Amino acid sequence: MSDAEPILTIEDLAVSFPGPPGQRRTQAVDRVNLSIYPKQTLAVVGESGSGKSVSAMSILRLIPCPPGRIDSGRILWKPDPRSPADDLLRFTDKQMRSVRGNQIAMIFQEPMTSLNPVYTVGEQILEAVLLHQQVTRADAVVIAERALKDVGIADPAGRLKEYPHQLSGGMRQRVMIAMALACEPRLLLADEPTTALDVTIQAQILELLRKLQHNKNMSILLITHDLGVVAENADVVAVMYAGRVVEYADVQTLFTRPLHPYTRGLLRSMPVLGQNVDRLDTVMDGATIPDDFPAGYKVAAHIEDANPPDGYGGPNAYLYEVEPSHWVLCEADAAKRGMKTPPHVDVIRRAADAVAS
């Protein structure tokens, strides 16, 4: 596939849920624009409730409708460069079943609640393989064993016969990854893949994902609130707050030159190893507007309000490319308006020798 074209593009996605009786709907995702390229890792980072998981679940049409509702937008899927992109939001249920788990797979946050406790690990992996691949049950067992072996699980044949409660948290997360990758998807949605795991297991899981991505030429959408995980694993970063993408850039640019006040506050609130302080900064403590914010653009100060009436940043704020491949949610003067297409950071990718072999 040509690396010059995104494999997935989200354009102006808006998702809402019912509010309290008599009040307007809550805008969980508000005009989100993202793109991800082949073999690229896009990290979506933000506080709990910022819209990260809803955005990812919208890709696979897993938002229950009702009560949820996709108000606008397109999700363009282009796994084959020779074919035009398809809008997943227009797919029928039958078409989406051919995409879920086959072309696009997802690792959910809690492996214990995501795995069915009354079925063995093997039965749950085999279900996905038999659904999407034209193979016999015996061949499906071989594929399932290979998937478990790929994620570092010893005695895969024996583990297929075990139930989720017989496995540790780290093992269950590896099973979730094996299940997601059994059909070799082009895109993996990893929603907080290291939640509730100790730091040693977290490192192992993340290293495993990097290795599998390198070996299988897979793209990853990594959802997290851990900026350390972002710095170590992402190629490109999208920062979300109150349902909107507030900043979008390659990982090095975002950490060395954050421009949006919320991003600056988020980075300032990180504890620094070896630094002795009486009190850690909050996001609001560090949320400042840069003195050298690019001319022709105006960014609003960060406010701690999850859903202001006009949306975070105001009704006239959009993602603008204020610097090359650096997009910020802001307002533009008349000379700068018009460039509001989904951000494409297409050439940023970690070198192959930096990936675990």
Image (cartoon, helix red, strand yellow):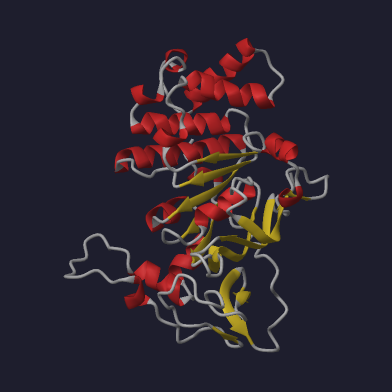
- Please give the name of the residue rendered at 53% of the width and 29% of the height, measured from the top-left corner: 179
Horizontally, is 14 left or right of 274 in the view?
right
Q: Looking at the image, can residue 183 be seen?
A: yes
**Above-or-below relation of 162 to 85:** above
- Please give the name of the residue rendered at 35% of the width and 71% of the height, measured from the top-left corner: 283
Q: Tell which of 217 and 63 is nearer to you.
A: 63
Horizontally, is 137 left or right of 279 in the view?
right
Q: Where's residue 288, x and y in %?
A: 40, 81
- Please give the name of the residue rendered at 16% of the width and 70% of the height, measured from the top-left corner: 278
Horizontally, is 79 left or right of 285 in the view?
right
Q: Where's residue 17, x and y in %?
A: 55, 59
**Above-or-below relation of 104 to 26:** above
- Please give the name of the residue rendered at 61% of the width and 88% of the height, measured from the top-left corner: 296
Q: Tell which of 351 and 305 is nearer to you.
A: 305
Q: Looking at the image, can residue 41 be seen?
A: no
Quadrant hosting residue 316: bottom right
Q: Where's residue 228, x and y in %?
A: 38, 55
Q: Where's residue 254, x and y in %?
A: 48, 67
**Above-or-below relation of 171 to 5:** above
**Image quarter hosting the N terminus:** top right
Q: Residue furthest front?
A: 22
